[in-house]
Image (tube, grey):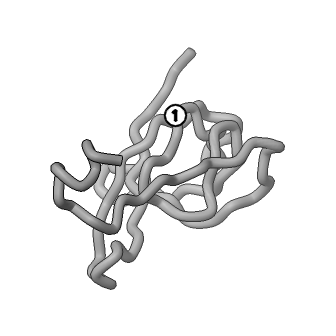
Amino acid sequence: MNNKKIVIDYLDKNNELSKELIWGEMCKTDQYFVRSIPFFAPNLAFNDLIQVEMDDKTLYFDDLIKPSNNSTLRIVFLNNDIKYIEKY
């Protein structure tokens, strides 16, 4: 298995540009299977087939080619007060 790091740009909850690194396994020269669970990048899941671009030896997510049958569920705590979270 020859996994490579892939950079995904996305807009965070404050509408600011952020980056997430995921692992990908090459299918073709510019196509990779997602081999880790994306924590923040939207609309991606484990085993999706994605298109990447290379810039200065870094792989960047470009497009979703074929979704897998997997889903990524995100749980977001809107109240950051740890005492509130521990209570419930």
Task: Please state if 18 lies on the left or on the right of 4 as rendered.
Answer: left
Label 1: few (<14), some (14–19) or many (≥20) C-alpha neighbours in 10 Å = some
Residue 17 % position (x, y): 29, 76
Rendering coords of residue 43 (x, y %): 62, 63
Which quarter of the figure is the N terminus placed in?
Answer: top right
Tell me if residue 17 comes above or below residue 26 in the rendering: below
Q: Secondary structure at mark 1?
A: loop
Task: Specify whether 31 is left or right of 6.
Answer: right
Question: What residue sits 47% from the left and 35% below the top?
Answer: 23
Viewer-proximal residue, 83 or 28? 83
Q: Mark 1 highlights which residue?
A: 36
Please state the horizontal and vertical placement of residue 55, each as a whole percent of the image: 36, 59
Instruction: Decide: is 80 above or below 15.
Output: above
Q: How many labels were placed on the picture? A: 1
Amino acid type, label 1: Ser
State which quadrant residue 11 falls in: bottom left
Estimate the x, y position of residue 15 in percent, counting from the top left.
33, 84
